[in-house]
Amino acid sequence: MRRGLALEVAGRDVTSVAVTGARTVRRQPAVALVERLRGARLGEAGRIGKFLLVPLDDGAETLVIHLRMSGQLLLTAPGWPLAKHTHAVLGLSDGRELRFVDPRTFGELFVAAAPPGGPGAPPGRPAALAHLGPDPLSPGWSAAVLGRGLIGRTARLKLLLMDQRFVAGIGNIYSDEALFEARLRFDRPAGSLSGDEIGRLHRAVRKTLRDAVTHRGSSLRDAQYVDLFGAPGDYQNRHRVYGREGEPCTRCGGPVRRISLGGRSTFLCETCQP
DNA sequence: CAGATGCCCTGGGCGC
DNA sequence: TGCGCCCAGGGCATCT
């Protein structure tokens, strides 16, 4: 989604703004966001974890977008019929519209001040995102950094991977996929990993996220996740455990298991992830 | 303090 | 066909 925004909306001006959803803009008065966006020039989108950051004008402020469970950003011609649960529409100077659609209304938009990022660099992170840990695809997230972070942690590995304060951007699908790739059980105490296991985990997280982006994300049965043009991703067809309960493990042929953890599903192969 | 639980919502799938 | 239940890519407040 970040790549799509960078390709399609960077350099456009916002010519009109309509916010109709009561919950979609909730960190600030909707009128403040509308007035700040109207007439703004959109910069090249950045990303920290699951948050999208679209710099405004000189980059001193940024539009922050989180899709949560069911949010979509769609780029359409103005005449297109408005999908149900469309909560915000930005008119763009190229005549198209950027629409935020979100049935469950967990997603949100807000405008925040962004510290300057230096010449040529993207703006820094807004204060509202200060709690986020490093993005696992950023250069700073090395195996050594991961290993230091794991020391003394008693949490189960999967829950720590999904803790956005620890590392930002891994959710329920990609934690399961990365743990399978790393051949690690989800309920290992995070601090119990050996050096070799830390290396495997680090490699697996980065490979899983990179591959998922290459394949344009995971669109599950309800096809909630789609790109700017409504096209679903492809990575769901490459999942090795997530959503594959009872199907054969791609590595050993044994059945993929589903276990409930913290009220959500965890998928794993108990043979390959001892 | 870390960890567990429940809630914010709508919609789809399934059993009866 | 319809009802009630369970489940779903996340994050946060509130308990212990």
Image (cartoon, coloured by chain):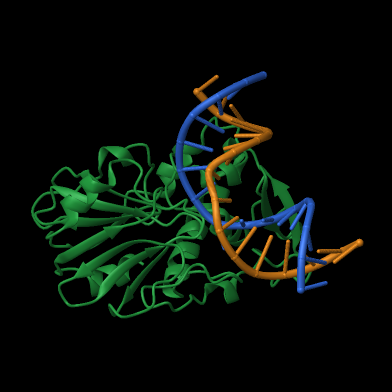
Chain colours: A green, B orange, C blue
Which residue corresponds to the image point at 48% horizontal and 76% vertical from the top-left?
A: A232
**Total labels drawn:** 0
**One can see residue A122 in this view:** no
Which residue corresponds to the image point at 49% horizontal and 57% vertical from the top-left?
A: A205
Place residue A177 in its image quadrant. bottom right
**One can see residue A61 in this view:** yes
Viewer-proximal residue among A135 and A32: A32
Place residue A112 in its image quadrant. top left
Quadrant placement of the N terminus of chain A: bottom left
Viewer-proximal residue among A89 and B1: A89
Q: Position of residue A18 (x, y in %)?
A: 27, 60
Left or right: where does residue A6 sit relative to residue A149? left
Which residue corresponds to the image point at 72% horizontal and 48% vertical from the top-left?
A: A260
Q: Position of residue A234 (x, y in %)?
A: 51, 77
Q: Position of residue A214 (x, y in %)?
A: 42, 74
Q: Position of residue A178 (x, y in %)?
A: 56, 58
Is A68 above or below relative to A2? above
